[in-house]
Structures are given as structure tokens and as C-alpha cells.
Image (cartoon, rainbow, N blue to C red):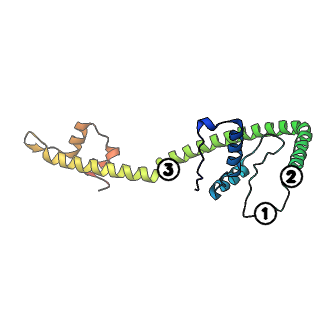
Amino acid sequence: METTPIKLTPANENTPNTAQSSSSSRLSSAKPMSSSLKEKLKRSRHSFRSPLGVVKRLKIEDDSQPQTSQPGDRETDTDVHRDDMREQRDCSHHTAEPAQKDLIQRCEELRKAVKEKSETLRRLKMAKMYREKNDLTQLQRLVDKWRSCAQSVLCELQSELTSEGKQVSLSQFIDSLGLDDKILHFDRTEEDFTDN
């Protein structure tokens, strides 16, 4: 960025004539805006939205490009357009009140319907999860696995136990533990498990 030297005047020379001449010399020797500053001003001008009906624009003089259009032309177009939009809004405001009430009521109805449907969907997902969790084929496999483990443990324990020097029968051992024959698939006549 370019800098321009500032001419300092001694304090005793500050008379109204010298002050006036120094201010005019400052204005005439004002430094030109850099291109980056011009770009920033242009961007800020385009992004600025005024709440007022009249648009105030920053005037940026670009030395490299001559101006071809009048700045007032664009402002009047914008002002007319804004006035038209404002009139349309005012006219539609009176007719839109019943329509807005209908829309608000419809929106509330839709919210209630969505809430009911989401609750139904949640319940269906819960039912599906319980059905998948309690899949009968999977439960049957687990029961069969438990039964085979229990049968093998009973056989090992029965072979290790002896009562008064002789080995205890499997039916006596199951009776002493209080287990149900049907759960273990135990056949008392054969003294063996039926699904071995």
C-alpha cells in the first residue's frame, strides 16, 4: 500500500490562512485508494441491505474505468421496484390473513398426524425388535444347547459320585438334584438321555 508524506507545520505558523491552505493541500494531495480497498468497499456495498426504502450507495471512483451510466438511474429502478413490492405486500396482507389462518391450522393438523405416525412407527419397531429378539428357532437352538450341556455335566458328576462304595444310578442322581426328566429328555426305563 502506498503512503504519502504528511507535511508538518510548526505551531507558530497556524494562522487561519495557513490552516486553510494546509487543509486544501491535504485534500488535493489525498492518496488514491488501493485496489484491495476498492474491492472490499464494492463487496460490502453489495452485501449491505438497508431497512430504508431509499438505497444509499457508496460512491467509488475507479480511475481505470470510465463511468458509462448515471448513478441515479439504478437507484430509481431499485426504489420503484421496492415500492411495487411494498404495495403488493400491503395488498396481499389483508387477503392473506384468512389464508394464513388456514395454513396455520393445516400445519397443526399435519404436526399432530406426524406425531401419531411416528408413535405408531416406534411401536411397530419395538414389536419387530421383540420378535427378532425372541426368534423361536434361535430360542430352540439355545434350549437344545443348554440341554446337551446339562446332560454332559450330569453324566460327568454321576460318574464321579459314589454312594456307600457303589456308583449311583443316573435316575437316582437326577432325583437327588430335583430335576425334571422331561426337561432333560431323560428316559428312566433305559437310564439314558433320549436325544444323545
Q: Residue at x 65, y 36 (%)?
A: 14
Instruction: Tell me the element at label 3.
Output: helix
Q: Residue at x 84, y 36 (%)?
A: 101
- Mark 2, secondary structure of its residue: helix
Tell me the residue that label 2 is attached to: 72
Q: Are marks 1 and 3 in contact (CB under 8 Å)?
A: no
Left or right, 69 with respect to 135, comes to right
Residues at marks 3 and 2, CA–CA distance in whole angstroms:
74 Å
Mark 2 or 1, nearer chain start: 1
Q: What is the quadrant of residue 108 in the picture?
A: top right
* Pair 1/3: label in front: 1
Q: CA distance from mark 2 to mark 1?
A: 16 Å
Q: Give the total number of marks visible in the rendering.
A: 3
Along the line of sight, the residue nearer the viewer: 116 or 14: 14
Residue at image point 47% right, 47% down: 133
**In the rendered structure, which disc, 1 or 3, sits on the residue that comes first in sequence?**
1
Mark carried by residue 132: 3
The picture quadrant where one finds residue 121 is: top right
Q: Which numbered marker is on residue 66? A: 1
Amino acid, disc 3: Glu
Front: mark 3 or 2: 2
How far from the left and from the top, in percent, is residue 86? 88, 42
**Dots 2, 1 in contact, CB < 8 A:** no
Badge 1 marks a residue whose secondary structure is loop
Q: Position of residue 80 (x, y in %)?
A: 90, 48
Q: Residue 124: x and y, percent?
A: 59, 45
